[in-house]
Image (cartoon, rainbow, N blue to C red):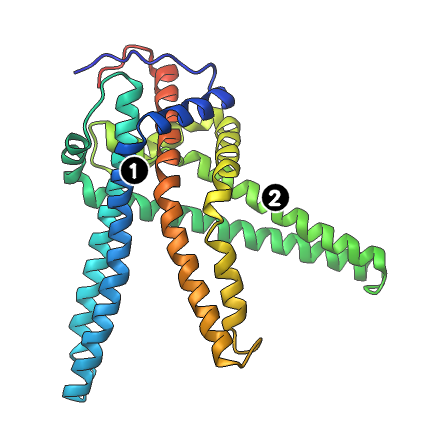
Amino acid sequence: MAKNNYDPVGTLSIGNVITTGTTLYKSNFKRYFQVSLRATGWLIAIGFSAVIGILIGGVLSGVTKSWLLTIPLGLGWIAIVLYCLAKYATNRAVICRLAYQEIIDAPESAEVATRQLTPRTWSFLRLSWLVGFYLCLVATISYIGLGILVVMAIGVAIYGLNLSIENPFIIVGIALLIIGAFLVWLVILIRYYAYWFIAELPLAIEQTTSANFSISRSNKLSRTVTSRVVLIITIAFLMTLPISAVGSVPSFIGQIMSSVNISGDPSTQAIGKSLVSLGLLLNLLSELFVMPFWQAIKAIVYADLRNRREGGDLII
C-alpha cells in the first residue's frame, strides 16, 4: 500500500502533460522498451502462425485432396490469434501500470506488474474490442450522417437553387464542403476517443476485472475535461507522427508499384511487394518506440484526473 505523492500538473495543463510524459519515457526507456518489445513480439507471432498454418494447410490439402482438415486448423489459428492479441493488450497495459506507479512514487518492476495483470488478460482483450467496436460504431454513424448532409447540401445548391455543376465556384464549394465534413468527422472521432483514452488504466490499476466498468470509468473521468484530452491526443499524435509515418511511405509506394493496373512488369511488382514488406517491418519497429510514450501519456492523464476528482490521498 502506498500513498499518492503525485503532484498535479496544473489543471491538466497540456504542455505539462506532454513534458512529463516525455521525461517519464526517457527516464524509464529501457524498462518500457522491453515490455513494448514483448508486446510487439505477440503481433509478430500472429504473422508467423499464419504462415505456418498456410503451409500445413497446403500440405494437408495436397495429401488428402480435401479441404475438410483445414477447418480445425483454421479454428486453431483463430484461437492462437485471440491469445496473441490478448497478450499484446495486456503488455500494453503493463506499461501503463509501470508509468502510473512511477507517478505516484510507488514503482514496480515489470515482472511484478505483469504478474498483477496476467489474471486480467482476457479482460484486456475484451476491453480493446469494445473500445474498437464503439469507435467503429461512432465512425460509421457519423460518416453516414455527414454524408447525407453533404449530399443534401449539394442537392439544394444544384437543384433547389438551380446552379450549374460545371460552375467553377460550385465545384470549389463542393470540394470545400467535403473537406469540411471530413474534418468534422475526424473531430467527432477524436472527441469520442478522448472519452475512452484512458480505458486501460482502471483495469490495470483499480480492483476490477470488468472491461465495461473500466470503459465507464474512463468516460466518467474524462468527460468534464474532454477538450483538453483531445488537445493532448492531438499534440502527442503530431509529436509521434514522424516516427509512425516511417513505414507508411515505402508501403504507399510499394502498393502503387505492385498494382497490376499501374504496372504489368513483374520486376516492378516484385519491388513494390518488397517495399510493402519493408513498410510493415518499419511500422513494427516504430510501434516499439511509440507505444511506451502513448502509454505514459495515458497514465499521466489518468493520475491527474483521479487526483482532481478523488483527492490527493489515493490509496493504491
Between 207 and 67, the residue placed more toward the observer is 67
Between 272 and 158, the residue placed more toward the observer is 272
Q: Tell me the quarter of the image containing the N terminus.
A: top left
Give, as a three-letter code, the residue at label 2.
Answer: Val
Rate crowding at label 1 as few (under 14), some (14 to 19) or many (20 or more) other CA atoms within 10 Å. Answer: some
Residue depicted at x 73% and y 55%? 175
Q: Tell me the quarter of the image containing the C terminus.
A: top left
Estimate the spatial distance between the alpha carbons at disc 1 and disc 2, rounded to whole Å: 35 Å
Q: Position of residue 127 (x, y in %)?
A: 29, 43
Q: Is residue 243 left or right of residue 72?
A: right
Residue ranking furthest to the bottom: 65
Rate crowding at label 2 as few (under 14), some (14 to 19) or many (20 or more) other CA atoms within 10 Å. Answer: some
Any part of residue 124 in sight: no
Q: Position of residue 294 (x, y in %)?
A: 39, 35
Residue depicted at x 40% and y 63%? 277
Residue depicted at x 25% and y 35%? 94
Q: Which quarter of the picture shows residue 77?
A: bottom left
Height in image: 102 above or below 278? Answer: above
Between 230 and 195, the residue placed more toward the observer is 230
The residue tagged 1 is 33
Height in image: 102 above or below 157? Answer: above
Any part of residue 217 in sight: yes
Q: Secondary structure at mark 2?
A: helix
Q: Is residue 104 left or right of residue 248?
A: left
Height in image: 312 above or below 278? Answer: above
Give, as a three-letter code, the residue at label 1.
Answer: Phe
Give the numbered dot on residue 184.
2
Q: Is residue 171 left or right of residue 262?
A: right
Height in image: 49 above or below 110? Answer: below
Which circle's residue, 1 or 2, is located before the other in the chain?
1
